[in-house]
Image: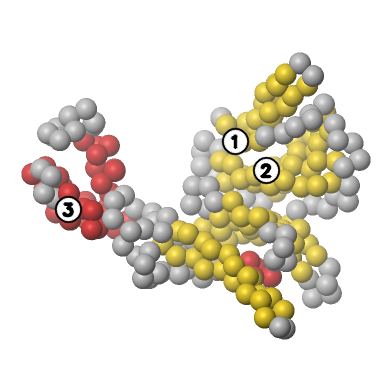
Amino acid sequence: MKMKMLPWLEFDIQVEILKRLPVKSLIQFRSVCKEWKSLIDSSPFIADHNNVGQEHLMIRYEVEDKTGSEVKYVCFVDDYDSFPENKFAPDIPPIFRLFRPFNTTIHSPCGLLCLEGLLREPDNSETHMVVLWNPSIRKSIAIVVPKNKNASIETILGFKKTGEPVVKIEFESLDDVDSALIAVYEPHLDHIKDLGICRGAAFFAMCSYNESLLLLDHDDDGRIVRAVEN
């Protein structure tokens, strides 16, 4: 079947695009052409549209009063139909609320939330934690980051081609700015793997590509891109 409105775009691709549109837009697009109307009204399309993963928006805010401050989180579906009414709010993992509020970072790639911070223990000690949370299935895992007294830590969330999430943790030595210890956490193995020490790196930018860790380094003559197999 070919579409009259978009002859340059494969029909299968059009279907995938339409599946991700809000209901109000689909109702309007039924009048674009007979093919779209037939598709949108079909039972298989309606079922597929309902099963498409929804994007979630997470807001973190702090409430202050005379007795102190409290960090709160709100999570809801970020789409045209339900955003104003805030119809859906998945349960926030309890550990999120225990993080020390002024030392927390959040990353959100591909529908997963990665929250990093210091967890305050009952004895007032603190544990460096990273939490991966999937709001769609309401599941989360917590990772204890290994201690390194002489390091500042940068956490990056990447993905291998096979789809499993990977938390990449960079330990950048404060005593020796020219070296860094790099480690990778793989949830399906529940294990942190040491990638070794990278020397001669004055600046880092890290990402996941082709199941490798790319390091953007530079020296006096210019920038060098290095790949570290993980």
- 173 vs 122, nearest the viewer: 173
Residue denoted by label 2? 168
What's the distance in space between the residues labelled 2 and 3, CA to CA? 44 Å
Disc 3 vs disc 1: which is toward the camera? 3
Report x, y in % for residue 142: 66, 60
Callout 2 environment at 10 Å: few (<14), some (14 to 19), or many (20+)?
Answer: many
Q: Residue at x 14, y 54 (%)?
A: 41
Callout 3 environment at 10 Å: few (<14), some (14 to 19), or many (20+)?
Answer: few
Disc 2 vs disc 3: which is toward the camera? 3
Q: Residue at x 79, y 30 (%)?
A: 202
Residue denoted by label 3? 28
Q: Residue furthest front?
A: 66
> Identity of the amino acid at label 3?
Gln
Mark 3 vs 1, N-terminal side: 3
Asked whether the beta carbons under mark 1 and mark 2 sit within 8 Å of each other, the answer is yes
Report x, y in % for residue 209: 57, 31
Residue 147: numbered disc: none
Q: Residue at x 69, y 47 (%)?
A: 155
Mark 2 vs 3, N-terminal side: 3
Q: Indicate the secondary structure of the residue bearing disc 3.
A: helix
Number of marks in the rendered image = 3
The quadrant holding residue 68 is bottom right
Residue 208: numbered disc: 1
